[in-house]
Image (cartoon, rainbow, N blue to C red):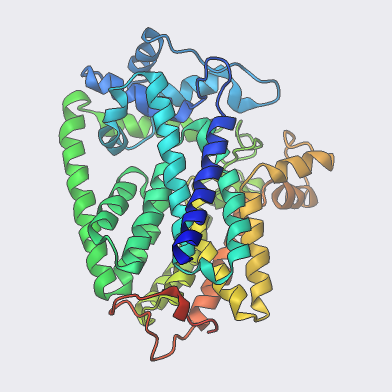
Amino acid sequence: MTGIKRLALILFCVGFAAILFFAYSDDSGRTLRTVDFAEIYFGGRAALQHSDPYDPATVLRQFLAEGGKFPPEVSGNPTSHSGVAQTVISNSVNLPTAFFLFLPFALLRWSVASYLWVGLSALLLAVAAWFTWDIGASRAPPIWAWFAGLMLIKCQQIFTSGNIAGFAVALCIIGAWCFLKERYALAGVVLLAISLAIKPHDSGFIWLYFLLAGGTLRKRALQTFAVAAVIGLCTVAWISRVSPHWYPELHRNLNVEVVRGGIDDPGPTGPCQNTPAPIIDLQAAISVFKDDPAVYNRVSYLLVGVLVLVWGVTVLRRRSSLAGAAYALATVSALTLLPVYHRPYDAMILLLALPACAILWAARERKRWIALALTLAAILVTTGLPLAVGTALGLNPSVPANTLAGKLAAVLILRPAPLTLLALGCFYLWVYIRCQPPASDPERHDHPVISTSTLPLAC
């Protein structure tokens, strides 16, 4: 029966992902609107022809030469403008490791590559969601089913854009499962290393937990770093031949998108900020009060830095256990989204908060309601729901607030994601600090992990 239940769970996850994969494809020619994937695909195609993938003019010529067409404009949706799509496709801001590791996709025709990209991303995210069940979420099956279902539904933003976050987040979670369950260690090392190499600001803090936890987990973290370093060295050797000045060019491309009014500007004037895929880092909230990068960047770094420092000291001092790992990973799954640029598709890393929420819910203590409310709120606010509610209330997101009350309303209603994620991270950090696993805890990481059925419920 256990095997049947697990098979049902994986089919549930894959079914969700498959349905959304086909539902969000373009019916006209069955061509996916994967603009972010096009950035990697056509950049890789340019590199295969020994052209510079970080030169916007070169990539744009490659795109047009292969019959590429920009998506149609949709009234009221700034992200659908052909100018934005052109900037995303030609102005690459991905690390060169993304071109290097996913070069096989560039060898395929666009129609095949785009479907394969989104289909594989959907499958990996479904497997990642299922693995959270196996590291603690099985304590409260209804909680896991509802929350994981909501998050998989939210995958439509990854599918329609083809963003690389789908791979980075899924590989990170699967690698974490391999380490925590002490199964398929080599696969876990490789998968987490790939995640680190392509999007370190999504998986960096997760890797840091394993490094600080000590014992076998630290060994796995060091092995992961070594593999990621090898990938990085191979990538630099390869990219330097086709793009000798790739680093300053990448820096230039980043600056183009984050300047005032750029597509990645977290301030009130950012063209993509008040859309279904807004920027969700802490800068987006602070910029409402002071739209100055020198201010909102420093405040974000300082605030999150202090919390991560407290978290890191706690990890070093705490005896390792699977329950403790669930709380620690839930904390950084929220905090990792705050200090630097992130969008809702990166928030799929919150799948790592589900085991901690399920464990607290099964403990039947008062704080389980806080865990439930904050985790659900974090899932909901990283979708387009806040914008829809704000519009229904008559708030105009295109007009910046000029009063303190208006700014507070803009943050709480139109940009609630950063503060909600901050509250979620602080809550799980508080739980983790107070958690004291029993001395006889069989889930310690210096011994093989047997089963989640013996997880301590209360701390």
* Residue in the image at 25% along x and 75% along y: 215
Percent across and percent down for residue 233 are: 17, 43
Percent across and percent down for residue 144 are: 58, 61
Q: Residue furthest bottom?
A: 439
* Residue in the image at 32% along x and 28% along y: 105
Percent across and percent down for residue 332 are: 46, 63
Image-based side of 75 in relation to 360, left or right: right
Percent across and percent down for residue 276 are: 64, 37
* Residue in the image at 40% along x and 32% along y: 117
Q: Residue furthest front?
A: 1
Q: Closest to the observer: 55 or 213?
A: 213
* Above or below: residue 278 compared with residue 456: above
Image-based side of 97 in relation to 310, left or right: left
Image-based side of 233 in relation to 185, left or right: left
* Above or below: residue 385 compared with residue 79: below
Which corner quadrant of the image does residue 206 belong to?
bottom left
* Residue in the image at 67% along x and 52% along y: 416
